[in-house]
Image (cartoon, grey):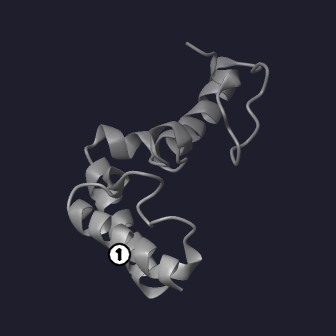
């Protein structure tokens, strides 16, 4: 397990090497860890916050993202290098709409090849 000071903290206040007192440590750590767990989006868990994962909101957030991504792809498919669902698999689109994305990706690729 990594030490707290080694944790990625981009966008956060700089974590000090040491604190002058227990009260100073608590005064710094409470807001820091609140931010880290509720506002900081972690790359290792799909740009979700630990709170989203812990409280079971991850699938809902992923579904919302898939809806927004689908609308963006439908409006401007030329802006996407690949299918809006990601690289080779539509599974990245999340539950609901995977088959539609697979069909849309194949049809979109055919349409681009004909141009």
Q: What residue sits right under mark 1 in the picture?
A: 107
- In this orientation, which residue lies closer to the viewer: 65 or 88? 88
Name the element at disc 1.
Answer: helix
Q: Position of residue 56 (x, y in %)?
A: 25, 44
| Residue positioned 36% across, 68% down in the render | 106
59 left or right of 82 in image? left
Q: Is residue 36 above or below residue 100?
A: above
| Residue positioned 32% across, 48% down in the render | 58
Of the 4 image quadrants, the one containing the N terminus is top right
Please rate how many residues cluster around mark 1, counting C-alpha atoms within 10 Å: few if below 14, some from 14 to 19, many from 20. Answer: few
Q: Is residue 70 above or below residue 3?
A: below
19 left or right of 33 in image? right
| Residue positioned 22% across, 55% down in the render | 95
- In this orientation, which residue lies closer to the viewer: 48 or 97? 97
Q: Position of residue 85 (x, y in %)?
A: 41, 61
56 left or right of 16 in image? left
| Residue positioned 44% across, 72% down in the render | 109
- In this orientation, which residue lies closer to the viewer: 69 or 2? 69
Q: Position of residue 63 (x, y in %)?
A: 29, 61
102 left or right of 51 in image? left
């Amino acid at each position: 397990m990594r030490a707290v000071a080694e944790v990625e903290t981009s966008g956060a206040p700089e974590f000090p090497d040491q604190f002058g007192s227990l009260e100073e440590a608590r005064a710094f750590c409470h807001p820091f860890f609140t931010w880290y767990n509720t506002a900081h989006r972690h790359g290792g868990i799909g740009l979700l916050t630990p709170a989203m994962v812990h409280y079971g909101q991850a699938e809902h957030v992923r579904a919302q993202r898939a809806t927004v991504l689908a609308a963006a792809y439908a409006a401007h498919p030329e802006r996407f290098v690949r299918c809006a669902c990601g690289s080779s698999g539509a599974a990245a689109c999340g539950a609901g709409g995977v088959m539609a994305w697979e069909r849309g990706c194949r049809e979109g690729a055919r349409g681009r090849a004909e141009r």
